[in-house]
Amino acid sequence: MSSVGKSSLLSLLQGREITKETNPTVGLEIEDSILNGKKVNIWDFGGQERFRFMWEDFLRGAGLTVFVCDSTEDNITKTKEIYNKFSRYMNTKIIAIANKQDLPSALSAKKVQKKLGIQTYGMSAIRADLRDRIREILEYEIETE
């Protein structure tokens, strides 16, 4: 699940400038944000295989887990495999973000949801005009957990 836009989504949420440059997250980055008027920690896991050993421990304490995929058939399959492997460790609400909806090859969020079997929202992390939308999604999902 590397290069799907997790860090770009976090930048979008945090109000930072969105760039098309990709720099893979190494390990884990933790940031604070305010959602529903409360301070929350957002964990951005490196998606490379070599970092997955630590996911199990971190996922156990999460309030909301957000799987991010790039809306391509291949990546959705990989995301589903990861979901199947780790979902048993999660005692949390789980949703997905079907990112990169601006690309012509992207499957719709509805199709991604059908394949993953979890609530899925479409997004394009490089579109600053969707900043409020990602905030609304996360606040809604946190509120209804």
Image (cartoon, rainbow, N blue to C red):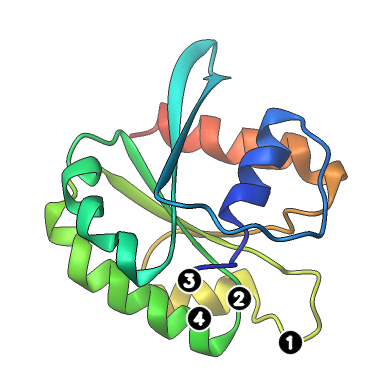
Please name the residue shown 64% across and 33% down the image: 135
Residue 93, relative to residue 67: is it above or below? above
Residue count near mark 4 (Cα–Cα under 10 Å), binned few <14, some 14–19, many ≥20: some
Tell me which numbered mark, 3 or 1, is placed earlier along the sequence.
Answer: 1
Residue marked by disc 1: 105
Image coordinates of residue 97 in percent, x first then y, are: 55, 58
Residue marked by disc 3: 113
Labelled pair 1, 4 in contact (Cβ < 8 Å) = no
Looking at the rendered structure, which numbered label has been put on residue 71? 2
Point out the frontmost of discs 1 and 4: 4
Point out the frontmost of discs 4 and 3: 4
Q: Number of marks in the image?
A: 4
Given the image, on which type of amino acid does mark 4 rest?
A: Asn
Quarter of the figure with the C terminus? top left
Residue marked by disc 4: 75
Labelled pair 2, 1 in contact (Cβ < 8 Å) = yes
Labelled pair 4, 2 in contact (Cβ < 8 Å) = yes
